[in-house]
Amino acid sequence: MRPSLPHPDTPHQPVAPGGGALPVETTGLRRRVLLAALGGTLTAGLAGCELRLGTSPMPVVPTADAAEAARDSLARQARLISETAEVVAQGGQEPVHKLAAQITHWAATQAKALGGVWEPWPTATALPSGFPTATPLPTASATAGPEELVSCLEAGADLARGCCEQESVPEVASTYASLYVAWTVWQHRLAPQTPAEPGRDTTLLSAPLPAALLLAYDSARFTLQTVAARSTDAQRERAVADAQVADRVVRASLALGGEDPRLPAYDPPQVRATGSPEQDWAHAVEMAVLHAEVAACATLEGADRLQALAGAADMALRARQWGSGPGDSPWPGLDG
């Protein structure tokens, strides 16, 4: 499922990556609020002369609620990431140059899908002096290098994580989870020396995993064990390590009771051949876990949601060891 962008004639309308507008709680300050703030203050003929009608008060910027503030902050960060990546792409060396150019496009797509940056007076061509405005946008340094882009992505991932944790609308929580994964993976791709993501801490699991997520982990465990049995050397070691991660999560969830959706065995994933069958299978099942973790963010809350974010980022990076993606699109975990 790929994100749908807003129509150019309807700016600042957030669009869920799967298509369709985000719920009204996150659509920001609606037109009637702005009209109320402006009503009785200006006419088109007087705006440029800084004249006010009668004793009408100076309009004020409506206060954003927490949901709108979160959406706007993420859109601002996505725009800053895109602009910084554009600078890096112009002066970077391969492979940084190519990846930065891709991030320029991907982050711009994210900013648009989030609804863009909110402007208090979107139709004004020239504001009279003294009119309140929104916080100025941060801008990319003209000499920004890969280190600055990595810092932008790290800050963005922290922001997306916090916004996801606090979000009350399920679909929006999954959208912010996908942002967190994207910015985390891009950071690791630009700076491979970045410390590995910790993944799920099974000691913090307080309730059984949702059935779909548990099934995804168990399928990954089985398939990765099969891959290990059919592999040698480094590929076998990687498959064993990834299977152990999945196995620990499955065992921890089952120890807490709940539904047991496991199957005795699983068929190999049906995938388009891009490498060896074993590599394709490992990649496919870890991508399936990523999608299940992002989806689980819609229903989990608090610490459980944070654990889902950790699991999603960990599986995204593990999947990249087996093949391209995630991190090759703006919306990992939501992009089908």
Image (cartoon, grey):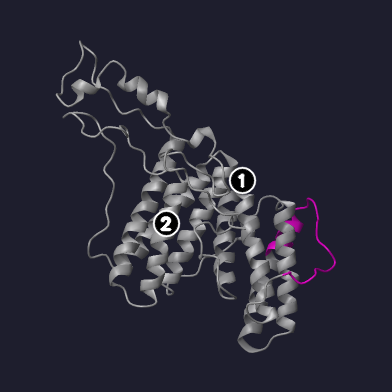
Disc 2 designates what residue?
A: 107
Q: Quadrant of the C terminus?
A: bottom right
- Compared to 12, does 203 lie above or below? below
- Residue 131 lies left or right of residue 178; in this view the side is left
Quarter where residue 93 is shown: bottom left
Q: Which percent across, then down, holds residue 231?
A: 69, 85
Q: Which percent across, then down, holds residue 122?
A: 32, 34
- Compared to 92, does 174 lie above or below? above
Indicate the amino acid at tag 2.
Ala
Q: Secondary structure at mark 1?
A: loop
Q: For the view shown, which residue lies furthest in the right direction?
A: 264
Indicate the amino acid at tag 1.
Ala
- Characterize the local packing of mark 2: few (<14), some (14-19) or many (20 or more) Cα atoms within 10 angstroms: many
- Residue 191 lies left or right of residue 327; in this view the side is left
Q: For the view shown, which residue lies furthest in the left direction?
A: 49
- Characterize the local packing of mark 1: few (<14), some (14-19) or many (20 or more) Cα atoms within 10 angstroms: many
Q: Is residue 34 magenta?
A: no
- Residue 313 lies left or right of residue 250; in this view the side is left
Disc 1 designates what residue?
A: 298
Q: Nearer the viewer, residue 170 or 196?
A: 170
- Residue 280 lies left or right of residue 60; in this view the side is right
Please provide the residue range marked out in magenta.
249-270
Q: Nearer the viewer, residue 216 or 162?
A: 216
- Residue at image position (38%, 61%) is 104
